[in-house]
Image (cartoon, rainbow, N blue to C red):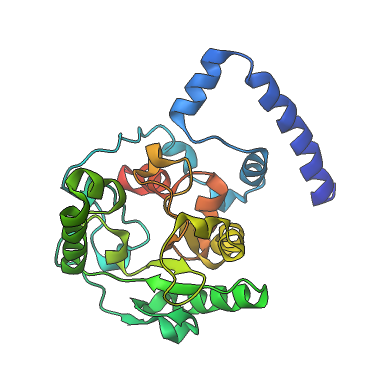
Amino acid sequence: MPAVTLRRVIAAALSTALIMSAAPAAIAQDVTLSSEPVSIETALDTLLLSPADTAGTAAFTTAALPACKIADKRTRYIKKKQWKKTLLDTKLRLPRSYEPWDLVSVRRADIAGSGKVRAKMIDDLKALARAARKAGKPLAVRSAWRSYDYQRALFDSYVRNHGYDQAIRFSARPGHSEHQLGTTVDFTVGPGVPLSTKFGNSPSGKWLARNGWKYGFIMSYPKGMKKWSCYSYEPWHWRYFGRDLARKIHRSGQVPRRYLWERFETAP
């Protein structure tokens, strides 16, 4: 049976199943407590994954994602070669000494803006920027790698200006920022444009939301997912995982924090 026809048949079956399963309130509550809402499109992608994509998934689906809380525990994967697996949130952190050895200017990717990122992501960042320009949806880099000390100074400035209780709601403490990995970029529509949730509704932001994963980038803090991501909506904040892992995270329908927790942080 042709792939398109098969997809339509599965979509019809899934649609019926999801409607019927929504009836019992108790079941619906269990689903929302255990994972993020799953769309028919995401379910279809999961069903159509290759065996290599789904291998070992069942072994990690029972790991309970902890509630977001302020703490300081060293994350499991702190070696720089383990950058894809490293989980950072309000509890898990990197050591102060963590600093990538292969940082290069984002300008090598032919993208506007400034900052440094790990050399291993330059080719995909360049491809992303080129595709965005071709689509008429240009992107620029507002912020990239940040050292532990830089993040500390930044967070302290927020505390002075807004108070600790407010600062902790929108800024990561030193060691807890994904920017320290050297594989995280804050995007805007042009050089010097400040970060804003309005980016998510801009043509460039919408294009990036649809296509970022194709080039290895995943939005860390999606809208309405603070319970699982620990941070409010940041449509500008994208972490590079490489194309293979980004595709798997995208198709899982999970926020990166949950995916990394279940597949890596709590793996045997």
Residue shown at 64%/15% (left/top)?
Answer: 23
In this view, 192 is above or below 27: below
Count all numbered tags in the image, as a single digit. Answer: 0
Viewer-closest of 189 and 240: 189
Residue shown at 79%/50% (left/top)?
Answer: 3
Viewer-closest of 100 and 203: 203
Is residue 245 something that shows in the picture? Answer: no
Q: Position of residue 31 (x, y in %)?
A: 51, 25
Viewer-closest of 168 and 178: 168
Q: Position of residue 107 (x, y in %)?
A: 43, 85
Is residue 35 something that shows in the picture? Answer: yes
Residue shown at 18%/48% (left/top)?
Answer: 163
In this view, 112 is above or below 203: below
Q: Is residue 226 left or right of residue 157?
A: right
Q: Position of residue 242 (x, y in %)?
A: 47, 66
In this view, 145 is above or below 161: below
Q: Is residue 128 left or right of residue 113?
A: right
Q: Quadrant of the C terminus?
A: top left
Q: Position of residue 79 (x, y in %)?
A: 24, 64
